[in-house]
Amino acid sequence: MSWITARRRHPAAGYVVIASVLVIIGTAYAVITSGAASASPQATPNSAQIADGRNLFVEECATCHGLYAQGTADAPSLIGVGAAAVNFQVTTGRMPAAELGAENDRKPPRLNATQTAAIAAYIQSLGGGPTVPSAAQVSTSGADVGLGQQLFVADCAACHNFVGAGGALTYGKYAPPLTASTPTQIYEAMLTGPEAMPVFNDLTITPQEKRDIIAYVTQVRSEPNPGGFSLGRVGPVTEGLVAFLGLLLFMVLAALWITAKHGKAHE
Amino acid sequence: MSVERALEGTGNWLDDRLHGARGVRVLLRKIFPDHWSFLLGEIILYSFIILLLTGTFLTLWFQPSMTQVVYHGSYVPLRGVRMSEAYASTLRISFDVRGGLLMRQIHHWAADLFMAAIMAHMLRVFFTGAYRKPREINWLIGIVLFTLGMFEGLFGYSLPDDLLSGAGLRITEGILQSFPLVGTYLAYFLFGGPFPGTQIIGRLYIIHVLIIPGLILALVTVHLFLMFHQKHTQMPGKGRTNENVVGAPMYPYFMAKTGAFFFFTFAALTLAATFVQINPVWLYGPYNPVAMSAGSQPDFYMGMLEGALRVMPNWQWVVFGHTFAFNVFLPALVPLGIIFTGAALWPFLEQWITGDRREHHLNDRPRNAPTRTAVGLAAITFYGILWAEGANDIIADHLDIPLYWITWGARVGIFVGPVIAYIITKRICMGLQRKDNHLVEHGVETGIIRQLPGGEFIEETRPVDPERLAVLLSRAEHPALPSAEATETDVPPPGMRGGLGRMRERLYHVVTESAPMPQIHGNGHGNGHGNGHGDGQLAETDGQGGHGEQAASTAGGTASAAEPQRDEDSH
């Protein structure tokens, strides 16, 4: 202790104390917060991966997002959006975008998993943000599908329709169908709010509730249609079309047939 | 033998007491004219019968109660979810009652077909002028039936208490509340408290299964009785006049056909219910006042009202702390009000304008009443645009059209569209009339060009066959209206005086506007040449042939049959 006692009045002592406390708290914070995501490979990036990501970013993304992801008039800044946003946009094929439009369509991804992880690590290194959820976070085992249905109609169906078949938004935007979304993508979408979608953070919808919603979305897709052909599950509009173009037309043809037969016989 | 004797004995026994034989004989020999469009009404009747049967089946299991229960039935995804008994019993009908889902789907498809056939039937009656004297009452009953059908449907699909139907009830509540001054009371009375309350399903249930079906049944009976009593109208044709009915007797022809048509209806509905899913309430989930789904549309017969709400700008006044919600009130009442009030008044308006008080048992061909047809198409356009607007989000999503483009298109379209439809339809009708005139005056083109010995070319035509000619000549001129202008010796009769009389005269010219009547034989040729199209050969043919031009080029012996009728008409 005499070593500390002797130097505690040293001019640099204050800085050293503050620096060490910051390091300790920072390290502890990093260890604690990354604990949940530790299973994910993206959560422990190394500098080589970040460098790869940086190179890929300059190739694929910088035209619109700026050389340092600072954003341009065409596209937003990516500082602080986190690896989850990158993973969502790139794995759904929305980024790199094909064109500047009201909304980017889902399409086959252009970059592979390694490349995606590299860019995600680079963006994560710029300003943090939500990380890619672990397999455990998006697991639907033991999730409550019934609760998920309730949450989905309360929070999601207004745009995505009651089974996630999608719907229209204003000015050419739309809520896409959720028929091809992976559990990870659904989780990331809630966490990062891509396109016109609001962010549903862990306070609005808890991680457990997110798993319930994912369970509902993925389960309802495979739910059979006991009544027959589903008509797209978009509500009564297609039913009305069938009523006119199917039922009424059939009956009119039947009427034509019945009266035509008689007309010939009667003459 | 013994069976016949037994039947005869029973029949005599009954007839001695009921004296029904004569009535039955009249019934069996009743003549029904034949046309495919006359069967549209039967689709309505048969769907209604199927609705009554399947509906009765559904009442055996449906619980019209809003008591909250926790679901433990066989539809796994909703297990453990709190819901009303009404919704739970609908799930039970769908998944646990044998044949329940099929019955539910037949019932719903039958409701859709019922309403679709009502629309088609009413359009047929309108466009053929079958609503004219003496059938105005039946036309009005039809409009009431259409309205009742709309409410019956709305209340019916509200009963399962699922997310979609709850959204419909929320709009119903909003429309009631939008009535100035009394709105909140109306909503409060219907729902028995604040929305959604605990009463509404039970109340809608009794309206849906007893009150409205009873009214529909009573009115359908009157409707059919009047049709029977006044005799069915017939389409123009050879030998068909305003004084006769040409067709097949009830027994055995009509009975066999109409019986077969019932089975067609039943088959169509059962096939649809078997292969096409309708109103999957289990996917919507139980109603939750805070939830809403994209693509929340009503069934198609309410779609026009939905579109009216969506097309309306957000106008609202607050006067002395009281809200006048024009953004809901006007779209809820005005567009459908225009359609229904207009439809109800039209027969009387037309009668007043044309001064035509005669009975009409022979239908018009739509082209032969260009103004009526044009007004009908204008109404269809108005209705159709609002109808499509009701599905604007589905159209936007699936056809990649920005949502507000559709809304603004509809905002402009409901004013401009009907006018354009009116003008175009009227021109098309009059063009078709001219085409008919041409056929009557010049016959059917044979495609044969003949060179005369003098070197001249003529085109040969053959006369229209008498069956078709009778149809072509079915157009009758409207009786003239007395002039609204006073002369030195005459004053206009009552009803033609003053500004109203002059307006009536102007409307008369609009409503009776048609192509000139076909000119048969010599006297018409002057006209024909006047607006001719430079085909000298054709005119020459007419000139050469003189009175016998049709006979000269005829291929068969049908011309002689046609001649007397045309002579009759030309004088």
Image: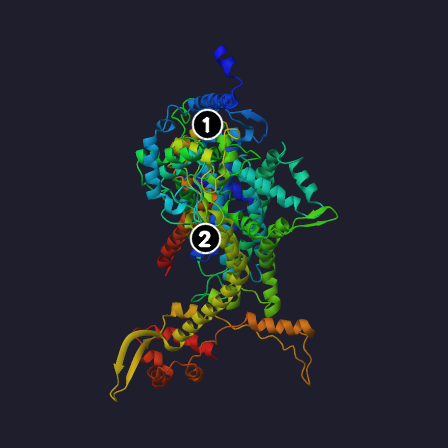
Judged from the image, the secondary structure of the residue bearing numbered disc 1 is: helix
From the viewer's side, name the closer residue of B49 and B18.
B49
Q: Alpha carbon of mark 1 to alpha carbon of mark 2: how far?
A: 53 Å
Residue B83 seen:
yes
User: Label 2: chain?
Assistant: B
> Where is the N terminus of chain B found, in terms of image quarters?
top left
Most extreme residue toward the right is B320
State the image quarter where residue B196 is shown: top right
Total labels drawn: 2
Rendered image: mark on residue A212: 1
Residue B415 x %, y %: 55, 61
Badge 1: residue crowd in 10 Å (few <14, some 14–19, many ≥20): many
Q: Are marks 1 and 2 in contact (CB under 8 Å)?
A: no
Residue depicted at x 56% and y 62%: B132
Q: Looking at the image, is B302 positioned above or below residue A92? A: below
Residue A228 x %, y %: 39, 37
Residue B46 seen:
no
The nearer-to-camera label among 1 and 2 is 1
From the viewer's side, name the closer residue of B99 and A101.
A101
Disc 2: which residue: B39
Residue B147 x %, y %: 58, 49
Residue A203 x %, y %: 53, 29
The kind of residue on which mark 2 rests is Leu
The kind of residue on which mark 1 rests is Asp
Badge 2: residue crowd in 10 Å (few <14, some 14–19, many ≥20): many
Do circles 1 and 2 both sit on a common chain?
no
From the viewer's side, name the closer residue of B23 and B484.
B484
User: Label 1: chain?
Assistant: A
